[in-house]
Image (cartoon, helix red, strand yellow):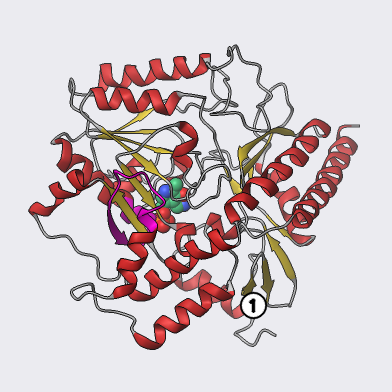
Amino acid sequence: KYTGPGYEKVWRIRSEHLLKNAPTYYKKPLLIHEGNMQWLFDHRGRRYLDMFGGIVTVSVGHCHPKVVEAAEEQMKSLWHTTNIYLHPKLYEYAEKLLSTLPKKLQVAYFVNSGSEANDIAMLLARLHTGSYDIISFCNAYHGMSMGAMALTAMCTWKHAVPSAFGVHHAMNPDVYRGVWGGAHCRDSPIQTVRECSCTPGECAASEQYYGQLEEVFKYSLPRGRIAGIFAESIQGIGGTVQFPKGLLKKAKELVKSNGGIYIADEVQTGFGRTGEHFWGFEMHGVEPDIVTMAKGMGNGFPLAAVVTTPEIASKAEQALHFSTFGGNPVASAVGLAVLEVIKEEKLQQRSHDVGTYLLQQLAGLRDKFECVGDVRGKGLMIGVEMVEDKDSRRPLPAKSFLDVWEDCKDMGLLLGRGGLSGNVFRIKPPMCITKADADFTIAVLEKALCKFTEKRERLLH
Ligand code: PMP
């Protein structure tokens, strides 16, 4: 039972005293006061199925008992030492975390957010290569610190002040909306509806986007001087955009041959989310030089890391570097428990099984409704792109999108929103969801889409 301050009071404090440019969801944002696995509860005691996991952050379930217990136990003995002393949890955790990564990635640096991790990755790339320029893809989201903001390439997240310089954006290799179509990296259970001229094992669009990347080298970069390229393994905030088969692998080779390194931003795609693999980069057949991670790593507890090779890490030793809270005992205990739960409860496998089932069901909705343009993703990293109609692919206007979204919420289903035009439903729930939750999601979404379609037809006739 909710006993906190009333809704109106909370809303007033938010409106008057908190920064307003942080987005809120829904006409009247929910006042959530409790979470339990895949469920959230509002102040009126209403239960919602959380199919967005607080932006892909709740990986194993809200207040998962094992994670809660680990945090509580640690809190009773030691919270904080600023890492100027040794404390066991951090080392136990580091060893376990590193065992999930390619062998060459053996040095971890723990911080508190994905943006911070990406800033440090930029620094490492520059120190290691002695070059300054960095590439990221258009439509990428890598964070909001001054460095990460420069990597982020969506006007919706840009302010009219200079962010870090030396960052260049390559064309967004979007197989649905991009100019060349293409096939997703590896075979997804759902192929994009866009016709493409790929032969088995090859993707024509991949070649075209590769050509665009070469243009960035040709026109924007000092010859042979690149520090690195950042890529999300599937773009998250950008609307679950999957890259054409083979592109990231070739991009890495191009960057390496020009002296740079490859940085995989696994903030959303890591920790089993994509189902088939523990890390998103694995589906691209790429071995990164640096991996950044956050979000699901702590199941909602602030915890992030940069992992790299001993050689790259050694370049950072020329000066001190420090994070007050990074790798604190409580965060380490939480991180360790999250890894254990993913393994014990086979959540990566579940992500694959339930995710694939959900993708297939969603493809049914795509085939049924004119306004569902594309269904894509892997495991429990799913996007449903809403359009005016399938031929034009014009993004569904915000008002219409919000109608469907709001209706789903009223029926007890929370979905995420993303894409540059805000027209993509993002489905990235805690990985503990079941097939019954997937069925509920489909039933609610179908009902909301029927209602929307009927309303639209009534207006047209
Ligand atoms: N990278 C990606 C792919 C993200 O989605 C985000 C956050 N949405 C970040 C980096 C930044 O993480 P944080 O908000 O923890 O700074």
Tell me which residue sits at (80%, 36%) in the image. 364
Q: Estimate the x, y position of residue 253 in percent, counting from the top left.
A: 32, 24
The amino acid type, in three-letter code, at marker 1 is Tyr
Left or right: 83 in relation to 213? left
The N terminus lies in quadrant: bottom right
Q: Can residue 162 be seen?
A: yes
Q: Is mark 1 within 8 Å of ligand 1?
A: no
Residue drawn at point x = 38 percent, y = 41 percent: 264
Residue of label 1 = 7
Q: Is residue 259 left or right of residue 183?
A: left
Q: Considering only vertical position in the picture, is 226 above or below 203?
A: below
- Magenta region, residue range: 97-117
* Residue at the farthest left position: 318
- For residue 259, which quarter of the picture? top left
> Residue at (74%, 38%) from the top-left corner?
360
Residue 59 appearing in the image: no
The picture places residue 449, in percent across and down from the top left corner, at: 81, 44
Percent coordinates x, y for residue 3 in the rendering: 64, 88
Q: Quick check: is 341 in the magenta stretch?
A: no
256 up-or-down from 91: above or below? above
Q: How many marks?
A: 1
Mark 1: secondary structure: helix
The answer to whether residue 34 is above or below residue 166 is: below
Left or right: 13, with 129 as reference point: right
10 Å crowding of disc 1: few (<14), some (14-19), many (20+): some
The residue lying at 23 percent from left, 31 percent from top is: 260
Q: Position of residue 419 (x, y in %)?
A: 56, 40
Frontmost residue, 427 versus 238: 427
Image quadrant in which the C terminus is located = top right
Query: Which corner quadrant of the image does residue 251 belong to?
Result: top left
